[in-house]
Image: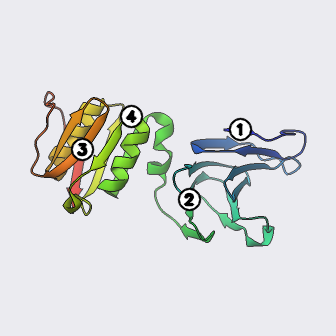
Amino acid sequence: LVTRDGFGNGAREVELTGEALFTVVHDATRPFRVIVGGTVVEDLGTEFAVRGYGDSPRVRVAVASGSVAIRHGLGPDTAVVLAPRDVATVGDSGVVAVQRGIDVSPFTAFSSGRLIFVDTPLSEVAAELTRWYGVEVRITDASLVDKHLTVTFEREALDEVLRIIGMSLDVRYVRDGNRVEFTGQGYTSSRPTPDARVLAEAGA
């Protein structure tokens, strides 16, 4: 997170790479804006989460309270206003797609040390584990791509997270140091861990 020159004197503008939760006191004379690539998110008095990583063109904004305006590019007339329980995504084309009236807790949970997956493809789960735990997570069996996971993790160690995923989706995985591979159907683990309460549901 980098503040732009003149922050606080006029507009309060920051540039983000990654994921952050903002709670902002609205000030019409000093608007607060988050810039992620070519996407601008402007607070209208709210709490909202912004996600945008350099390895993905997609930007996601989830509004917990208040409202924000989101636009891609410079034209203010293209802005879309988001209300509480709205989630917007901006892809390669710059089009703002909005889902309204949904539970945004999975998109803000990271700020309290939780990972929440809701019917999430295993490929997205793998990418999130890579960012969260600083390991390389790969899927080497294409048949696993259609596996979806619903689970809540709260500060579990990586080995426990992998065990829960393996049991929930009935998939094999191998961990070798900082490398993890999901290798196929049929739960087995190269690093078994003690039994723990499974908090997950699985679907394909």
The residue that disc 1 covers is: 2
Q: Position of residue 69 (x, y in %)?
A: 71, 61
Q: Position of residue 12 (x, y in %)?
A: 80, 44
* Mark 4 crowdedness (10 Å alpha carbons): few <14, some 14-19, many ≥20: few
Q: Is residue 177 left or right of residue 74?
A: left
The residue that disc 4 covers is: 133
Find out whether the residues at labels 1 and 3 contact each other: C-beta distance under 8 Å: no
Which mark is on residue 181?
A: 3
**Mark toward the start of the polypeptide (4 vs 3):** 4
Which of the 4 quarters of the picture holds residue 4? top right
Q: Is residue 161 left or right of residue 188?
A: right
The residue located at (32%, 43%) in the rendering is: 137
**Mark toward the start of the polypeptide (2 vs 1):** 1
Q: Secondary structure at mark 2?
A: loop
Find out whether the residues at labels 3 and 2 contact each other: C-beta distance under 8 Å: no
Q: Secondary structure at mark 1?
A: strand
Tally the numbered discs.
Answer: 4
Which mark is on residue 57?
A: 2
